[in-house]
Amino acid sequence: MANNRGQGRKPKPKYLKLLEGEPNKHRINQDEPQPYPKAPTAPTWLSREAKAEWKRVAPQMEAIGILTEIDMAMFASYCSAYGKLVWAEKMIKKARKGNEAAGGLIVKTPTGALQTSPYVWIYNKALEQIRSFGSEFGLSPSSRTRIKVVKPDEDEDDIFTK
């Protein structure tokens, strides 16, 4: 018999349920760990392009309470995938200069056969990873449509403790 655990939709974290406005309050896990919403420092090993993406997105995510210190590895993975996407695009453009007809998307093997450039594979894999990590953080237009940002009252410190 197959193991069905882990199948179906992933449960939403409490902050997303609160931001989206969960109508069934009993579905909100009141005991869910709530890390402090503070953006972690970018890892030094990220590429230049990945660090630029970190600096572009992290402050906005921190401001709306989505990014926390413990999300560093997951967010670094998103930024790293973005860096690989940019790198692969640059390599495709560089290959295009020598092979205008194929637009850098097709290469000739040592045997003379034509095949898809490995940079295209890297590009597509990075794009797939960006979509996956991005949806975890609400970084796609469709995932953002499910989020309602509730501004806290001035006397309230944290919207996540409601």
Image (spheres, rainbow, N blue to C red):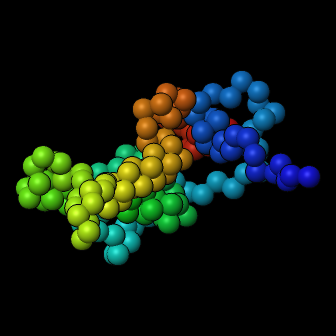
Q: Residue at x 26, y 56 (%)?
A: 114
**How far across and how far down the image is residue 96, in percent?**
13, 53
Q: Residue at x 24, y 51 (%)?
A: 105
Please determine whether, in this image, residue 93 is positioned above or below residue 150: below
**How far across and how far down the image is residue 75, in percent?**
46, 58
Outermost residue toward the bottom in this view: 45
Q: Is residue 38 left or right of residue 103?
A: right
Q: Quadrant of the C terminus?
A: top right
**How far across and how far down the image is residue 118, in percent?**
32, 61
Residue 82 found in image quarter: bottom left
Report the front residue among 8 and 152. Answer: 8
Outermost residue toward the top in this view: 23
Please determine whether, in this image, residue 84 is positioned above or below residue 150: below
Report the front residue among 100 and 60. Answer: 100
Please determine whether, in this image, residue 86 is positioned above or below residue 60: below
Residue 17 found in image quarter: top right
Q: Residue at x 37, y 63 (%)?
A: 80
- Can the viewer see residue 83? no
**How far across and how far down the image is residue 88, in percent?**
27, 59
Q: Residue at x 63, y 27 (%)?
A: 21
Report the front residue among 112 and 79. Answer: 112
- Can the viewer see residue 80? yes
Q: Is residue 10 left or right of residue 51?
A: right
